[in-house]
Structures are given as C-alpha cells and as structure tokens.
C-alpha cells in the first residue's frame, strides 16, 4: 500500500480551536472538530493571556492550546470510526489508521496553523513581548517546532524535522487568522469590486479590499460572539446571543439603552451578558464605520459584504439589523460555510493555495484613534 498523505489545518482562536483533517489525494476535508481552547482558564481575552505570559505561564499556555488540538483530533477520530464511509475510496490510507489520534498524525505530512497575533506565538511557546507595549509589533514565527502535539507528530512519523507551518500576521493585532480569511474570501487578490469582510470573534478583524488597496484593522469584541459569556448564557453560540438580544429588544424586554426590563423573559441571558454584547456589537459597528472612512468610501459603495467567524454561517441577518451590528446601508451579508474563514484559508494553503497578498496593505489603528472611545459609547444603543 502507498504511503497515506493527509494534512491538518488549524484555526487557533482565543476561545475555540477548530481542526480539519484533509485527504491530500482526494483533495477533500474528511472531518472537522471544534473544541474549547483550554487557555480560557487563564482568561477569556488576549490581554488576560498576555498577563499570564508576564506571570511566567508561557509553557502552560502552550500546553493548554496544543492539548486542545489533540482533543479535537480525538473527536475527529471518533467521528471517522462512526462514519466509516467518510474516507474516500481513492484514499491511500487504511480507514482504521484514522481511528486514533496517533494514527491520524502518522498519516499527516503537513500541519498549517492560522492564529491571531497572540495565539500564534503562544501555540509555539514563544513570548509575544512586542505586543505588551508600544509600538506593538507582532511575532513572526514561520514554524512551530515544540509542544506535545508536534512531539507526538514527530514520534508517529519517526521524523524529528517536522514542524507546523504558521501563517504570518498582517499587523500588530491583525493576525494570521485574518491572513487566512483573506485567502478564503478572495480579498488576497486585486478586484474591480469593493469588498468588505468582518471576522467576528473575540477580536473582530475588519478587512476591506478597494482596488489595489487593502485596509485592515481589528477591534476588541470580547467573547460574546463565540458563546463564552460570563453567566448563564455560557455555551450559547454567538448567533443565539444575537437572536435572543434582538428578540428582547423587539418585544420590549430590553430597552434601547440595553437595560433588561423583564429578566424572566430573557433567560438564559442576564443583564451582564447584554452589557458584554453591547460592547461587542458597538466595537464592530464603529470599527466598520471608521474603516470605511479611512478608505474614503461609504457603506453604499460596498459591492460585497461577508461575515465569517465561529457563528457566521448561522447568523440571522434580521436580528443583526435589529441590534445595529453593522451599518444599514451595507449589502445583505453572505457567509462562507459551517467552518470559520480562518480555517477555510488554512485548508486552502494546505492544499497548495498561493499565500501571497496582492496590493498595498494599510493597517488602521482604530483603538488608538482619538474618536474611537467616544463613538463606541454612542454606538452602545440597541435599535
């Protein structure tokens, strides 16, 4: 039997890790799994993770995230064992080889990782010193050569030279996850259309293609869009949170200022959850508006609008409009698939997509803009 050829694509997010197993010969994704990033026990946002690094937990953070990937691989193995027809007939592997984590890793020749500017170095056990103080410079790590995932991969393939391919960051807090989204959505190429992509996660990346120019930024949205809220709503998908808030606003259970007037009707959301969500939606709304202004265009000039992220495929456009997640003049958003844009981009690279980004990249620091905080407060209203 010929040697099996598989690849792994990873989207390492602040809250969740998503993994895809790819059959290189059949050029298809056999299975995906999404699990909680165990680093959440060090805090739910990148600032908390950076704080944990400064407290000396860099190796603990690496262990937590790579263990999370191994958990996802275990879920994939179980899925393939249950769904025996998932492995194509033209695959070179014995299907039973993919029923264990070790078996999957022994069949994989390539691992491609998309992660934000903080998660990427933490995945590699590297301290992201440049992100803890101005001028905020990201770590450029092209390969990951340490950690229990990498060690197990090397052991199962008897190859000590193996290393995961780390996609590069675009700017300080616009990481390789946004880079992968550019590839997945076609924004990596020059286009005659003006295109807007918003990747909704703990950090929301906003990407705008206008001819040869690519404008990129990120805003802190917190965990509200990823279903990791701080109370009874924990575990809800971001799409569920948007739907419940929109329903509460429409029914009068939440007023325009975000005050919950009927807590029993809003369960499992709490007042605290609604406040967290207000901050997240305001950050995204203002981020979109200010990036459009930086590019000297208005919402009506956008030809294509894509929402991606952990819950993009489940988004209810009506609910998003009710709470003012994005400017009303934008085209109705489309979504990519059940997987995140970052994972789809990593899959494309694993299958040989050209990773170069065409044109001029303009990083816009919105959080440091003197008007951002003022406009954030104005955008808290739920309409």
Image (spheres, rainbow, N blue to C red):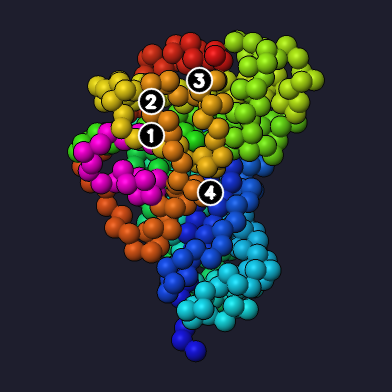
Q: CA distance from mark 4 to mark 3?
A: 24 Å
**Quadrant of the rendered image containing residue 373:** top left
Mark with earlier residue (4, 3): 3
Mark with earlier residue (1, 2): 1
Residue 195 vertical position relative to residue 167 in the rendered view, above or below = above
Q: CA distance from mark 1 to mark 4?
A: 17 Å
Residue 242 vertical position relative to residue 101 in the rendered view, above or below = above
Query: For numbered disc 3, what is the local secondary structure?
Result: loop
Mark 1 crowdedness (10 Å alpha carbons): few <14, some 14-19, many ≥20: some
Q: Would you say the residues marked 3 and 1 are in contact, meaning their CB atoms lie under 8 Å apart?
A: no
Instruction: Report the front residue among 125 and 86.
Output: 86
Mark 3 crowdedness (10 Å alpha carbons): few <14, some 14-19, many ≥20: many
Instruction: Report the front residue among 248 and 360.
Output: 248
**Residue at x 56%, y 62% (from the top left corner):** 31
Query: Label 3: which residue?
Result: 324
Query: Label 1: which residue?
Result: 305
The location of residue 188, given as percent across then percent down, is 29, 46
The location of residue 330, given as percent across then percent down, is 38, 25
Mark with earlier residue (4, 2): 2
Instruction: Report the front residue among 249 and 158.
Output: 249
Query: Label 4: which residue?
Result: 338
Mark with earlier residue (3, 1): 1
Q: Would you say the residues marked 4 and 3 are in contact, meaning their CB atoms lie under 8 Å apart?
A: no
Q: Would you say the residues marked 1 and 2 are in contact, meaning their CB atoms lie under 8 Å apart?
A: yes
Query: For numbered disc 2, what is the local secondary structure?
Result: loop
């Amino acid at each position: 039997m010929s040697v099996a050829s598989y690849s792994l694509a990873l989207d390492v997010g602040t809250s969740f890790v998503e993994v895809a197993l790819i059959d290189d010969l059949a050029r298809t994704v056999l299975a995906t799994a999404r699990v909680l990033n165990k680093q959440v026990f060090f805090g739910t946002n990148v600032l908390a993770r950076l704080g944990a690094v400064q407290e000396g937990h860099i190796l603990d953070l690496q262990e937590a995230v790579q263990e999370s990937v191994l958990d996802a691989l275990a879920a994939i193995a179980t899925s393939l064992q249950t769904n025996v027809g998932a492995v194509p007939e033209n695959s070179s592997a014995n299907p039973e080889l993919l029923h264990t984590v070790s078996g999957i890793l022994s069949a994989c020749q390539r691992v491609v990782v998309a992660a934000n500017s903080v998660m990427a170095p933490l995945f590699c056990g590297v301290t992201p010193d440049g992100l803890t103080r101005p001028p905020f410079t990201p770590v450029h790590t092209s390969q990951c050569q340490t950690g229990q995932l990498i060690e197990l991969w090397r052991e199962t393939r008897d190859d000590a030279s193996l290393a995961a391919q780390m996609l590069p960051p675009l700017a300080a807090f616009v990481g390789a996850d946004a880079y992968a989204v550019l590839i997945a959505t076609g924004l990596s190429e020059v286009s005659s259309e003006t295109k807007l992509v918003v990747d909704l996660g703990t950090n929301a990346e906003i990407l705008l293609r206008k001819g040869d120019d690519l404008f990129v930024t990120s805003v802190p949205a917190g965990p509200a869009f990823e279903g990791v809220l701080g109370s009874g709503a924990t575990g809800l998908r971001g799409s569920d949170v948007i739907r419940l808030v929109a329903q509460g606003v429409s029914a009068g259970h939440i007023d325009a200022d975000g005050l919950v007037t009927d807590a029993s009707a809003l369960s499992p959301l709490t007042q605290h959850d609604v406040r967290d969500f207000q901050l997240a939606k305001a950050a995204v709304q203002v981020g979109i508006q200010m990036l459009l202004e930086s590019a000297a265009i208005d919402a009506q000039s956008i030809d294509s609008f894509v929402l991606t992220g952990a819950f993009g495929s489940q988004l209810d456009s009506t609910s998003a409009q009710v709470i003012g997640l994005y400017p009303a003049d934008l085209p109705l958003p489309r979504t990519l698939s059940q997987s995140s844009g970052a994972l789809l981009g990593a899959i494309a690279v694993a299958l040989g997509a050209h990773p170069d980004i065409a044109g001029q990249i303009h990083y816009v620091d919105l959080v440091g803009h003197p008007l951002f905080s003022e406009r954030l407060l104005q955008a808290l209203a739920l309409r």
